[in-house]
Image: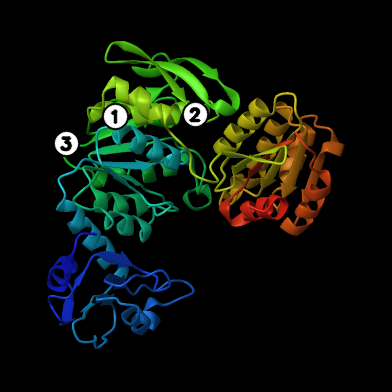
Amino acid sequence: MEKLHADKISEWVQGKLDGDAKACADKAATDTRTMEAGSLYFAIRGERFDGHQFIEKAFEKGASIVVSEISYSPPPGCAVIIVKDTVKALGDLARRYLEAFPVPVVGITGSTGKTSTKDMITQLLSTQYVVHKTMGNFNNHIGLPLSVLSLTRNHTAAVFEMGMSGPGEIEYLSGIIRPDLGVITNIGISHIEKLGSRQNILRAKLEMIKGMKENGRLVLNGDDELLSGLEGLLPMPVIFYGINENIRLHAFGIESLGEAGVRFTVKIRGEEVEIRLPAPGIHNVSNALAAIACALELGISNENIQKGLAEYSQEKMRLSITHYDGVKVINDAYNAAPASMAAALAVLRDIAGKHRSIAVLGDMLELGDFSQDAHRQTGGIVAQQQIHSLVAIGELARDYVNGALERGMNPENTKHFSSVEMAIKHLKEFIQPDDVILFKGSRGMNLDAVIEALFGS
């Protein structure tokens, strides 16, 4: 964050300033445990903790400015800014801060593929821009503003991911970053427990339009039937991408390279460009096309598009592949939805080849009334892909097994465990050299801890 003085922050968040108006901060924080000296600390009330209880600790650790909902006497040379709502103040500050930077902003949302798409867009833009992107999974009403406040004068473009769990959230986040380019990767059934239908999820994702700049453009997945149906209905230019040959920006000649990734060709500016993407799974072609669409809008050359995607690398726990003493582990334990489950199982089958394939699947959460069917359908895909063994973990995961059995999977090759501990005990005895194992489930299932227990990292 560029240095900000207390009086300017107070003006931007419409707060009441107490203390030194010229106190300044060059970083923002909401957690005193990781806070550094010279920080702007926001005291936020959460479900388990109230940040106001740590204001004294914040000043002890070197905070120069605190934004609070309650009065507090600041130490000499420091400041407190009193506001009605510290979460809103954080968002307001991020919005005003970003307005001071004349950089193109890309905003990304969707049911699956957001982070991979964000990283691919960043990779392509980085060939010609200095890009700032969302930090890790900082994509909600707290994390996104903190990501915005990490922008500096050195950056010449910004890429932000927007997550949601209910209506109104994307509108709020979009209003903070005001995208020039808005990307929607797909409309699945993640969070359908709260939203009720895919149509409601579509409406929630389209809230992004309300925050976009007047000359903003949308980049949409034309292979998604709900998004493709929007053609001609939206109040701004739309760029569709996909693998359907009727879509102007489409991939053809798609070839899986197994663990080495995928290869495909795309026609860009009248030239057929061969793309080699070192990310396994045909589903990543769609993410790459979204990135290409953004790159074209922001003037990235064909050569740099090809080069940028060739140098792409995935984040840990997102279909990353690691070798442990002859066992190949596909770690996709960060989150789960039916579409991403199907994609990951296809990758497992593709990479395993003649070796024994094992799918270790945890519950998919937040699916509401669709939960049982979604788990059964995923189990059916396990059988269809001819995965050798299924290890299901969690109460909902029982339906993975039921779905697999319905599709003819050998009962001896399916196991269900209610607890992670029981699954670990089984897997320690079951895993053999040359096995290829997929670990995937919702973040709350903590499957990365299973990998650590089995392989030590």
Q: Nearer the viewer, mark 2 or mark 3?
A: 2
Would you say residue 224 is visible in this rendering?
no
Q: Which residue is mark 1?
A: 295
Which residue is nearer to you in this view: 357 or 402? Answer: 357
Q: Which mark is residue 215?
A: 3
Residue at far right of view: 412
Q: Earlier in the sequence, mark 1 or mark 2?
A: 2
Q: Position of residue 142 (x, y in %)?
A: 36, 61
Q: Which mark sits nearer the N-terminus, 1 or 3?
A: 3
Residue 362: image location, x then y, percent: 66, 48
Structural distance between the alpha carbons of marks 1 and 2: 18 Å
**What amino acid type is highlighted by mark number 3?**
Asn
Mark 2 or mark 3: name the one nearer the start of the chain: 3
Residue 278, label in figure: 2
Residue at image point 31% right, 25% down = 304
Q: Residue at x 34, y 75 (%)?
A: 43
